[in-house]
Amino acid sequence: MSLEQTWRWFGPHDPVSFKEIKQTGAEGIVTALHQIPVGDVWPVNEIMKRKAVIEAEGLRWSVVESVPVHEEIKKRNGKYRQYIENYRQTIRNLGECGIDTVCYNFMPVLDWSRTDLEVVYHDGSTTTKFETNAFAAFDLFILRRPGAEGQYIEAEIRRARAYYETLDDRDKDRLAATVLLGLPGSGEAYTVKQLREALHDYEGIGEDELRNNLISFIKEILSDAEESGVRMVIHPDDPPRPLLGLPRVVSSSDDIARILEAADSTSNGLTLCTGSLGAGFQNDLVAIAGRFARKINFIHLRNVSRTSDGDFVEEDHLGGDIDLYGVMKTLLVEQERRRQEGRTDVRMPMRPDHGHLMDADRKRRSVYPGYSLFGRMRGLAELRGLELGILRSLQEGRK
């Protein structure tokens, strides 16, 4: 067998067409109803409308990425109970429509964070990076978050100030716009004022509180997921570290274990994102894949080069510091085990996560950072070749 090859598509406004997606070799589509406000129920008719568009092109809606979790659920305040009820109904509606895998995350305020979206790679393509000095400079001198200086050591403040002093006004605006970028596909971003207000609302919520809120949420939606045949797969934090004084609780192997062990169910699973977890210098992705193989039902494969200081750059899929050979082999062995056991979750959808912006894509309208056609197509081709080589070697080893 092989992992199901999928492609993230952001809906009718995505500059990449279904015809182009099919020509990459992808079989499944990973998408969401981005037009529906966070917290609202996804109606059956809207789900079926999107599903029909996808299937008319000979593809299948493989994974929902994502059904966003409202901030009031994460904080357990305001109308969080109503938002949980809405989330449960959305899960039931997706199950009714035959959608069996839902990716979600529990990152407070910021979904993913970078400090530069226009890094020129050595081959001339464009990639992204996260630089701790730049992020600290934003936090301390642009956002001016109250109490921020107390969360950095003096050497970190000194380096951040030195970095900030190299920036002109345009550079400062560019850094702010990058950090403030919203959810992928949303086209929205925070303002500095809105971000300050959002951070203020998390006062008093530390790591323990956020983790407890996540586990409570999982337990509250789990019966609906089980009854609807839907696998909920949590996405790790990106990057896997606290940011702006906010806790993050899906950043390490032990974090994941706490979440999966809190509710033992086939509907409580993991999105293995090698890039998000891999940005953490402490994370061994082959070990993580092996530890949680039975609970992995969605896979994002990409690579990063990283430092012990927390900096990272998004690399080619088979470059960087992450052993994708070891990860892929672990996943393929797991898939075969599932097949032999007769499990229903054998597909194990995989997508090439992010890709460099290449010259052929530069004239396309509004390509979201990381989601170019040719960069991801190259990544998928590389991953497909890697997979074939591993499968052949496993077959030879069984003879």
Image (tube, rainbow, N blue to C red):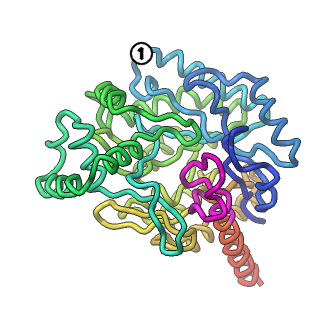
Location of residue 342 (image quadrant) = bottom right
> Could you tell me what secondary structure mostly forms the magenta stretch?
loop
Residue occupying the far left of the picture: 154
Q: From the top left corner, tell me how far across and down residue 292 is, in percent.
A: 54, 56
Residue 41 makes an appearance in the image? yes
- Magenta stretch: residue 356 in it? yes
Task: Indicate whether 117 appears above or below 203.
Answer: below
Q: Residue under circle 1?
A: 78
Between residue 126 and residue 204, name the one nearer to us: 126
Residue name at image x 69 percent, y 47 percent:
15
Residue 267 seen in render: no
Which residue sits at x=70%, y=81%? Answer: 393
Who is closer to the viewer here, 244 or 173? 173
Q: Position of residue 302 (x, y in %)?
A: 55, 62
Left or right of 96? Residue 81 is left
Q: Is residue 385 magenta?
A: no
Does 260 appear above or below 124?
above
* Viewport quadrant of the N terminus: bottom right
Q: Quadrant of the C terminus?
A: bottom right
Which one is in front, 138 or 325? 138
Q: Secondary structure at mark 1?
A: loop
Residue shown at 41% from the left, 33% from the top? 190
Q: Badge 1: how crowded within 10 Å, few (<14), some, or many (20+)?
A: few
Q: Nearer the viewer, residue 397 or 298?
A: 298
Place of residue 74 in the rendered image (x, y in percent of width and height, measured from the top left): 43, 29
Compared with 49, 21 (above or below) is below
Q: Is residue 131 left or right of residue 93?
A: left
In the image, what residue type sits under mark 1?
A: Gly
Residue at the spot 59% in from the left edge and 57% down from the top edge: 353
The part of the chain drawn in magenta is 353-377
- For the image shown, how many numbered marks are present on the structure? 1
> Residue 220, how many percent across, how many down?
54, 26
